Amino acid sequence: MSILILLLGILVLFVLILKKINPMIALLAVAILTGLFLGMPAAKVMSSITSGVGSTLGSMVMVLALGAMMGKLIEDSGSAQRIVFILIKAFGKNNIQWAVLITGLMVGIPLFYNAGFVVLIPLVFAISAATGLSKLYIGLPMATALSLTHGFLPPHPGPVALAGIFHADIGKTLIYGLILTLPIAAVAGVLFPRLIIKKDQPILSTLVIEEGKNLPSAARSFITALLPVFLIVAGTAGSSISFPYVGKTFFVFLADPTAALLISVLITLFLQQNSIERAMESCAEGVKSIAMIILIIAAGGAFKQILIDSGMGETVKTLTANLSLSPLILAWLITAALRVTLGSATVAALTASGMVLPLIGPNAPPELMVLSVGAGSLMFSHVNDTGFWMFKEYFNLTLKETFSTWTMMESIVSILGLIGVLALNQLNF
């Protein structure tokens, strides 16, 4: 009976999102209704809501805020554009997809998906015009890279929220995510477009793109864009050494994503060319841009806590105990089903988290569970996903063309992500 109530709750959530109700309001309403129908006292329902919001945001709100500040500073400084120009010159026209792919990965780490897409899409069109190559041929690598960073790599909201819920080490999650990201990016972002998109446009000119003026230097651009990743990875590597040594405390401090991002923001403020007043305006704008994302995550945390406190997670664990499926596969299947149903990758991941949390154990480490759920949240993006429509409209595609390019690319990323997670688990990473 409890499973039927959960399915009914998910159906109500789907209808509310379909009716364009804000996801935060929809999640909160469904969380309360689900808790009540599962037999929880009203006072306990509201207590669980408060607990879920607090436990979810308490572990990551500073990471999200500082990450948003970092991304906005990089966007406003022109570092993303400078990285694009440098990589295009380094790779040349014949390998232009690799240049765009690597650019997308670098820009996608500090920038959220929508911001990264808006920053890079004019450059994709400029490259297409300069080379005569199809916009899709250039644009799919960019979209693949941004999607991968969105699904697998902290400090993006989804992976950070899941790491907090599953009590996963963010540094290890980032390292594992990077291991998965590079080969998946090559397959979905370079090989796949080459197989399906004909380069039927003649080369109109040599590749010349105006770099513009007043952009930061190459060193400054790469340092600011990659600094958070470098600090978190270095801190994780240094703190993982088992024997005590001088300076280990510093690496433990550095491995904390809040500390790493705060240091990165301060160094970026020191290196950037704008005034402090302008930089502070950028930081404020960056936080404003993710305010709704934070509220959606908070509501998702409330729904997660309802599922935990009502015993739903344990029910799912009991029902699936006799299945000969890896918990990582089961988590991916549940999340993928929610993604196809609900559309939003973040909402799907957060909704699934309360159901799969009890599955974490020796055969499903928390860091790999984060990546498995993250991979499932990217599966088969279609008409109920805003990313689907953004890609369709910017590239002026038909629905059929969008399904055969964007939807297929997202599905390839999701399936390969699951395969990679299972491989890492077999290797006992």
Image (tube, grey):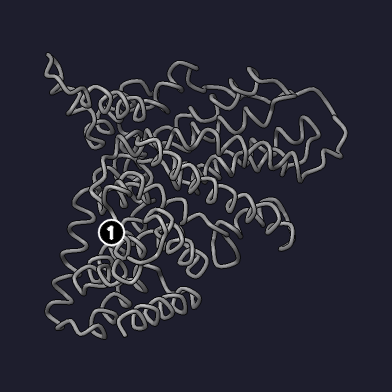
Question: Horizontal placement of 195 versus 181: left or right?
Answer: right
Going 35% across and 36% down the picture, which residue do you hit?
428
- Amino acid on which the number 1 mark rests in the picture: Leu
Q: Is residue 44 above or below residue 344?
A: below
Q: Quadrant of the C terminus?
A: top left
Question: Quick check: 122 left or right of 132?
Answer: left
Residue that appears at 20% across and 63% down: 52
Q: Which of 32 and 116 is in front in this view?
A: 32
Query: Which sits in the foreground, 375 or 249?
Result: 375
Residue for badge 1: 357
Residue at 30 percent of width and 34 percent of height: 171
Q: Position of residue 406 (x, y in %)?
A: 64, 53
Q: Is residue 272 left or right of residue 214?
A: left
> In the picture provided, is 51 more to the left or to the right than 321?
left
Q: In this view, does 14 lie above or below 331?
A: below
* Residue 28 pos. (x, y %): 30, 72
Q: In this view, does 157 lie above or below 18?
A: above
| Residue 367 rendering spot, x and y as whole percentages | 32, 44
- Kindly identify the residue that appears in the image at 60 percent across and 58 percent down: 388
